[in-house]
């Protein structure tokens, strides 16, 4: 696992830092089944094709979230995810927010991961049958099929979830079970994985405790410690090579005052900011 401090110099602000960490965690948790392959240098360079299926009224976050996470995996870890946004007919598809997204025509071809986006509620329209049929066909070419939130209704309609465990947005758990009684719907799960088919609850589902546990498992530190380290690493080049005061630097990277900056700096680097600045200037 890459050390969090190593990415901090690319982060201009703490808000962006936290966003990077959240996306990093998303990649770590969602790609667990890729770990064994990544340990083989002959396999890790192979491109993994990820297709995300959208349809009229899809939730934009269900598309942008996975794309951003996998794009960051490509940038930070040298992964090779090839991302395709697809729809039944291709062209522009309007999301629930009114934003239109350019898509390619969904093709029946080999795919590593096939993801079905969710909608604000159970997807509804004259196109549902056609989309469900396409999901059933394309999934036979995919190593794994996943759905986000209410995308589970489309995957259930395709027949892929019959006899399998599943979850969805908490507000629609009972409806999913009622409409598809062959499913084993578990409303207490954030995600399910059953024989190559993944389902998930809402895109932002979870609690602070769940996030903290998952974050610690993925990074080896608590979110608070990670943010502290990122703040120190963001401050370090400013301490070394700028004329900003410690008060200005502290406010720039998110510390409440210079004392907090100094305490965290010493705890993580073994030097105070003033000591580091003197050492840097002597070395120039």
Image: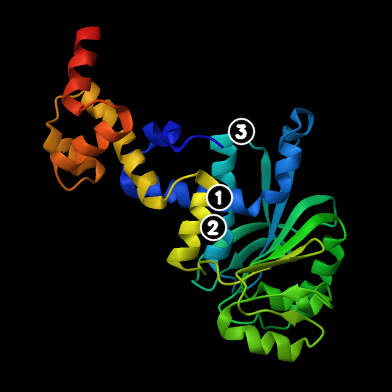
User: Which quarter of the picture shows residue 235?
Assistant: top left
Location of residue 71 in the rendering, given as x and y in whole percent from the top left corner: 57, 44
Mark 3 in CB contact with mark 1 (< 8 angstroms): no
| Front residue (pair 190, 93) | 190
Residue at 48% x, 35% y: name it.
3
Location of residue 108 in the rendering, given as x and y in whole percent from the top left corner: 85, 57
Q: On the rendered structure, is 105 left or right of 221?
A: right
Q: Which residue is mark 1?
A: 69
Q: Label 1: state its secondary structure.
A: helix
Measure how far apart labels 3 and 1 are at the Cα level.
13 Å
Q: On the rendered structure, is 188 left or right of 111?
A: left
Residue at 40% x, 51% y: name it.
223
Is residue 250 placed above or below 122 in the rendered structure?
above
Measure how far apart labels 2 and 1 are at the Cα level.
6 Å
Mark 2 in CB contact with mark 1 (< 8 angstroms): yes
Is residue 71 placed above or below 244 in the rendered structure?
below
Tag 1 or tag 3, which sits nearer the N-term?
A: 1
Q: On the rendered structure, is 97 left or right of 63?
A: left
The C terminus is located in which quarter? top left
How many residues crowd around disc 1 within 10 Å: few (fewer than 14), some, or many (20 or more)?
A: many
Q: Which residue is mark 3?
A: 78
Instruction: Check residue 2 in the rendering and tell me which mark sits there, or answer none.
Output: none
Instruction: Check residue 65 in the rendering and tell me which mark sits there, or answer none.
Output: 2
């Amino acid at each position: 696992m890459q050390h969090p401090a190593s990415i901090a110099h690319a982060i201009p602000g703490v808000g962006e830092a936290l966003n990077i960490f959240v996306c990093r965690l998303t990649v770590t948790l969602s790609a667990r089944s890729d770990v064994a392959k990544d340990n083989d240098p002959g396999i890790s360079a192979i491109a993994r094709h990820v297709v995300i299926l959208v349809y009229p009224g899809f939730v934009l976050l269900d598309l942008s979230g996975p794309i951003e996470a996998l794009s960051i995996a490509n940038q930070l870890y040298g992964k090779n995810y090839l991302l395709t946004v697809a729809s039944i007919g291709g062209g522009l598809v309007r999301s629930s927010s009114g934003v239109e997204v350019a898509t390619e025509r969904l093709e029946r071809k080999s795919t590593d991961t096939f993801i079905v986006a969710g909608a604000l509620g159970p997807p509804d329209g004259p196109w549902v049958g056609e989309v469900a049929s396409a999901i059933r066909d394309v999934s036979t070419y995919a190593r794994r099929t996943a759905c986000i939130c209410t995308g589970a209704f489309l995957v259930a309609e395709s027949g892929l979830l019959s006899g399998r465990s599943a979850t969805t947005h908490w507000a629609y758990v009972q409806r999913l079970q009622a409409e598809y009684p062959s499913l084993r719907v578990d409303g207490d799960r954030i995600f399910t994985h059953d024989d190559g088919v993944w389902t998930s609850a809402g895109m932002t589902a979870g609690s602070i405790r769940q996030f903290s546990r998952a974050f610690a498992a993925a990074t080896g530190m608590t979110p608070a410690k990670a943010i502290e380290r990122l703040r120190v690493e963001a401050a370090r080049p400013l301490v070394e090579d700028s004329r900003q005061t410690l008060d200005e630097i502290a406010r720039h990277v998110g510390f409440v005052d210079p004392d907090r900056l100094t305490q965290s700096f010493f705890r993580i680097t073994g030097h105070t900011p003033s000591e580091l600045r003197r050492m840097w200037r002597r070395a120039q």
